[in-house]
Image: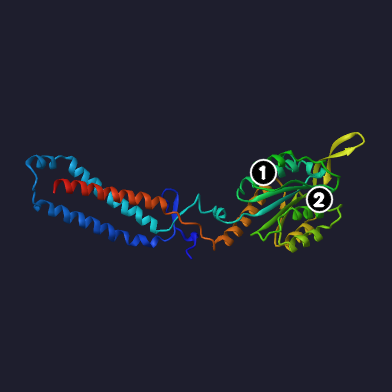
Amino acid sequence: MQQMYSLLNISVFGYHFVELWWLLLLPFVLFFIVYRQKKRNNKSNSVKFTKSSKALTELEDTRIPILLKIAFGSLLVGVSILFLALLKPVKTVDLETTERYGEGIDIILSMDISGSMMATDFTPNRLEAAKEMAKEFIANRKSDRIGLVVYEGEAYTACPATLNHDFLKDVVGQVQSGWLEPGTAIGVGLGTAVARLRDEDLVSKVVILLSDGENNKGSITPLEAAELAKAKNVRVYTIGIGKDGYATMPVQTPFGTVLQNTKVSIDEKLLTQMAELTGGKYFRATDNESLRAIYAKIDALEKTKIVDSNLEKEPPQSPSLFLLLGGALVSLSILLELVIYKRYA
């Protein structure tokens, strides 16, 4: 099979070409056409002219050689375009978007929205930074069904997996801390996300779980949820969000909400175990840019997996435009020659 990733960087009308070796024959065909034309021109001086002197005057009209040149040019260009149809033209936007030819991934974003996500070690805080990076990630995954689960001491499906990414980004933008029972139920957050993925034998099913703390609530432990993900062939990427040491975050007191420096405590060992158990990876984000870079890495990892699975699904050839255009030019050339030579023979 001719793999599309072996294509040279040649593009015509937005098409790329698989079997470029046909171009080796094109010079010989063009040489034959030029040789035929020169031979015809050489013979034209000795052709008997049986028409009237008026017709001879018409033949000397400069429009005749111009039309003959147009006919010759149309033949050359038309044959060249017909050759492009032999090269297996493939209509693509760019060579990095080949996932369009296969089935997309199902992805659930499982986002911690507990009170500690209001810490200001990110700009403007952890939650708003996480929402912004999630929306950027969603915008880059046009062919994937993506959903959102949010969790604190319990979990809630904010949006099932969908291709309506504009709606999903609106939902992400509306997420606020305090929607649910206080706490951090990492296991429930992952379990709910896994339950929201389709059971079909998809190319890939992924959960991206983000947390800034330690598991302290829930009816299912994080490792039990990870085992469930593994059993359902779901790959889990975990992200720990927050700087080392202390971070300023809002704390409820009898006198209202005040900002306090609170020690950051992320169970990195647990998040790493969860990811590795399912074939995923653990990442640590300490600021907005590192979180953006993590989402970019996950995007690249999952895009690579789609490409690998689609190498066996060569995209459809699209020679129709080249056959139509090339055929029209060759037909025009033949028609012009027939009219001219028939009229003045």
Which residue appears farthest toward the top when viewing the image? Answer: 255
User: Camera-side residue: 241 or 42?
Assistant: 42
Do tag 1 and tag 2 residues touch (Cβ < 8 Å)? no
User: Camera-side residue: 161 or 253?
Assistant: 161
**Cα distance in 3D space between marks 1 and 2:** 22 Å
Relative horizontal placement of residue 226, taking residue 308 as reference (left or right): right
What amino acid does circle 1 point to? Lys
Tag 2 residue = 213
Which residue appears farthest toward the left when viewing the image? Answer: 53
Tag 1 residue = 135
Which residue appears farthest toward the bottom when viewing the image? Answer: 1
What amino acid does circle 2 point to? Gly
Relative horizontal placement of residue 192, taking residue 33 as reference (left or right): right
Relative horizontal placement of residue 244, taking residue 21 as reference (left or right): right
- Examine the image and state in which quarter residue 64 appears: top left
Residue positioned 19% across, 46% down in the render: 340
Residue 201 in percent (x, y) is at 67, 61
Residue positioned 32% across, 51% down in the render: 78
